[in-house]
C-alpha cells in the first residue's frame, strides 16, 4: 500500500494597515492577529497561531479549529484587492499543516 503523506497547503493572510496598526486575517483558517508593524504582525500571527493549535491539540479540539475558514467577505476582498507587497514565510513545524504563510499587504 502506498501511503504518501498529504501535501501541506499555503495559508494566505490578508493584511491591512489602519493608521500604523496592522491587522491580519487568515483565509484558509479563520485566525486573526494585530501588530504595531508589518513584521510585528507576522511574528504575532505565526506565534499566536502555533500557540492556539497547540492548545487545541491538548484539548482535543484541533479538528474543529482547523476546519473554520474565513468568511466569504474576506475571500472576496482577497481576490478583488490590489496588493502592495507579498511576504512568504516558510513553515516547518509539526503542528502547522501549512508549508508557508503568505502575508499580502493591501494597498490603500
Image: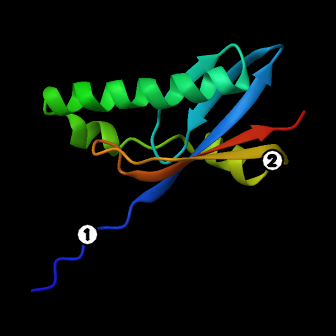
Q: Quadrant of the N terminus?
A: bottom left
Front residue of 60/76: it is 60
| Residue at image mark 1 | 5
| Image location of residue 46, percent across then percent down | 48, 31
| Image location of residue 36, percent across then percent down | 69, 13
Front residue of 66/80: it is 66
Give the answer, above or below, for where 81 lies relative to 108: below
Residue in the picture at 30% in, 67% down: 6
Q: Quadrant of the C terminus?
A: top right
| Image location of residue 85, percent across then percent down | 80, 44
> Left or right of 88: which side holds 95?
left
Residue in the picture at 37% in, 31% down: 50
What number of labels is visible?
2
Disc 1 element: loop
Q: CA distance from mark 2 to mark 1?
A: 34 Å
Residue in the picture at 60% in, 30% down: 42
**Which numbered disc, 2 or 1, marks the residue that appears first in the sequence?**
1
Count residues near mark 2 (Cα–Cα under 10 Å), then give few for <14, some for 14-19, many for 20+: some
Count residues near mark 1 (Cα–Cα under 10 Å), then give few for <14, some for 14-19, many for 20+: few
Q: Which residue appears farthest toward the right when viewing the image?
A: 108
Residue 98, labelled with which disc? Answer: none
| Image location of residue 101, percent across then percent down | 54, 46
Give the answer, above or below, for where 96 lies relative to 10: above
**Quadrant hosting residue 89:** top right
Disc 2 element: loop
| Residue at image mark 2 | 81
Amino acid at each position: 500500500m502506498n501511503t504518501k503523506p498529504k501535501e501541506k497547503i499555503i495559508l494566505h493572510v490578508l493584511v491591512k494597515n489602519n493608521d500604523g496598526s496592522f491587522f491580519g486575517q487568515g483565509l484558509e483558517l479563520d485566525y486573526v492577529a494585530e501588530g504595531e508593524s508589518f513584521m510585528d504582525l507576522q511574528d504575532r500571527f505565526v506565534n499566536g497561531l502555533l500557540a492556539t493549535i497547540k492548545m487545541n491539540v491538548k484539548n482535543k479540539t484541533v479538528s474543529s479549529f482547523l476546519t473554520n475558514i474565513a468568511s466569504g467577505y474576506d475571500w472576496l476582498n482577497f481576490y478583488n484587492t490590489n496588493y502592495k507587497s507579498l511576504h512568504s514565510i516558510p513553515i516547518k513545524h509539526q503542528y502547522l499543516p501549512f508549508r508557508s504563510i503568505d502575508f499580502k499587504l493591501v494597498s490603500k
